[in-house]
Image (cartoon, rainbow, N blue to C red):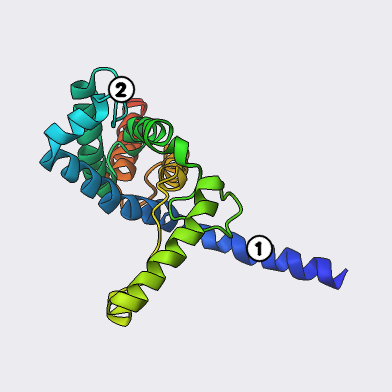
Amino acid sequence: MPLFQFFTRLHLQFDKTRALDFLAPLALRFYLVPVFWMAGVNKLEGFDNVVQWFGNEDWGLALPFPYLLALLATWTEILGAVLLLLGFAVRYISIPLMITMLVAAFSAHWQNGWQAIADPSGLFANQQVLDSADKLARAKTILQEHGHYEWLTSSGNFVILNNGIEFSITYFVMLLVLFFAGAGRFISMDYWFARNTRRLQSASKIPTHQ
């Protein structure tokens, strides 16, 4: 029984943290802002190349209406970053952003499996990832023999980009949480807009005495 009482009291203490529950959606929003801003701006700066990549059947994604889809993806990400930053219309913008992430996952990354960075020891390592181990080891050997390896690795270890669906699905899950949870209290325009709307609705229901 003492153990049960301990966990009961602990649970009650955890409940007190609900006063800070607005920090969770705020953290998700601020994490995603630079992700979508950079993705959208990069597409905008190289828009013609993006259109070609979306539509090309030989080396691209072979998507229909490449110009329209590139335009939608670019401005969805840019506008999405701004709205997430402001906490405005977060549940609404989460929908096209989730669609963008699903399109990216299944059109650009699906064939590479799960992992974004090739890690043969990973749970979801496919054959492509397993084959990368020998290639990475060989590349490191060449660099150690013929390059300044310590200088080359001073900013981080060399890896092989697998370009799987990991990042796009992770962002999708984060957006899914925002869709259901909303922008969060206090530090969002959505919160204050909804609060003022409820206040006006309550005021309009107060009967007037003549």
Q: Compute the Cα span from label 1 to label 2.
A: 52 Å
Say which amino acid is labelled 1: Leu
Relative to 39, say whether 159 is above or below: below
Of 142 and 133, the residue lying toward us? 142
Percent position (x, y) of residue 12?
Answer: 66, 63
Say which amino acid is labelled 2: Leu
Percent position (x, y) of residue 188?
Answer: 30, 48
From the viewer's perspective, tell me whether residue 21 is left or right of residue 5. left
Relative to 190, say whether 72 is above or below: above
* Mark found first going from the N terminus, 1 or 2: 1
Q: Element under label 2?
A: loop
Of 162 and 174, the residue lying toward us? 162
Percent position (x, y) of residue 184?
Answer: 39, 48
Q: Element under label 1?
A: helix
Percent position (x, y) of residue 65?
Answer: 24, 18
Write the residue at 52% across / 57% down: 18
Relative to 135, say whether 85 is above or below: above
Residue assigned mark 1: 12
